[in-house]
């Protein structure tokens, strides 16, 4: 029986990352999923980093009333005419009015509806 338990454990360890995963308490768990989510989170964090944005551009963002979360649910950067969505070359979104990354759920006083 002990040998059979070890075989099962070896099988689960070997194939969990290959997509088999484990179903525990109704939740699908896979070591690969956790690594992928961590990589995505790291990539997304680079889209809030302002260390390479000049002080002048940061001041411009502030003067335009840019905030990371829109106070008006239906007015967000993602549905603004000035919003620049991410591209293959640039993984962060941006804005026509200023430099630096833009959060899709953000807002500024120059929000303009898409036409």
Image (tube, helix red, strand yellow):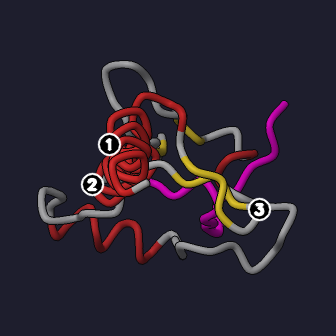
Q: Is residue 19 above or below residue 101?
A: above
Left or right: where does residue 6 sit relative to residue 67?
A: left
The local secondary structure at tag 1 comes to: helix
Q: State the residue at coordinates (84%, 30%).
A: 115
Q: Is residue 6 above or below residue 84?
A: below
Mark 3–mark 1 Cα distance, whole angstroms, equals 22 Å
> Who is closer to the viewer here, 46 or 6?
6
Which of the two labelled residues, at mark 3 and mark 1, occupies the earlier sequence position?
Answer: 1
Instruction: Tell whether position 103 is magenta.
Output: yes
> Who is closer to the viewer here, 9 or 18?
9
Q: Please identify the dominant SS of the magenta region.
A: loop
Q: Is residue 33 above or below residue 90?
A: below
- Name the image quarter holding the N terminus: bottom left
Left or right: where does residue 91 sit relative to residue 109?
A: left
User: Which residue carries the number 1 mark?
Assistant: 10
Can residue 101 be seen from the camera position used here?
no
User: Which residue carries the number 3 mark?
Assistant: 26
Q: State the residue at coordinates (29%, 55%).
A: 42
Residue 17, picture quadrant: top left
Can residue 5 be seen from the camera position used here?
yes
Magenta range: 101-115
């Amino acid at each position: 029986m002990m040998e059979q338990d070890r075989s099962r454990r070896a099988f689960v360890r070997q194939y969990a990352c290959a997509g088999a995963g484990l179903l525990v308490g109704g939740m699908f768990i896979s070591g690969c999923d956790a690594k992928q989510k961590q990589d995505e989170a790291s990539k997304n964090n680079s889209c809030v980093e302002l260390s390479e944005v000049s002080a002048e551009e940061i001041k411009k963002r502030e003067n335009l009333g840019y905030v990371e979360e829109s106070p008006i649910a239906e007015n967000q950067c993602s549905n603004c005419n000035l919003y620049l969505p991410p591209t293959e070359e640039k993984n962060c979104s941006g804005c026509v009015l200023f430099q630096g990354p833009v959060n899709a759920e953000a807002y500024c006083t120059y929000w303009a509806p898409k036409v």
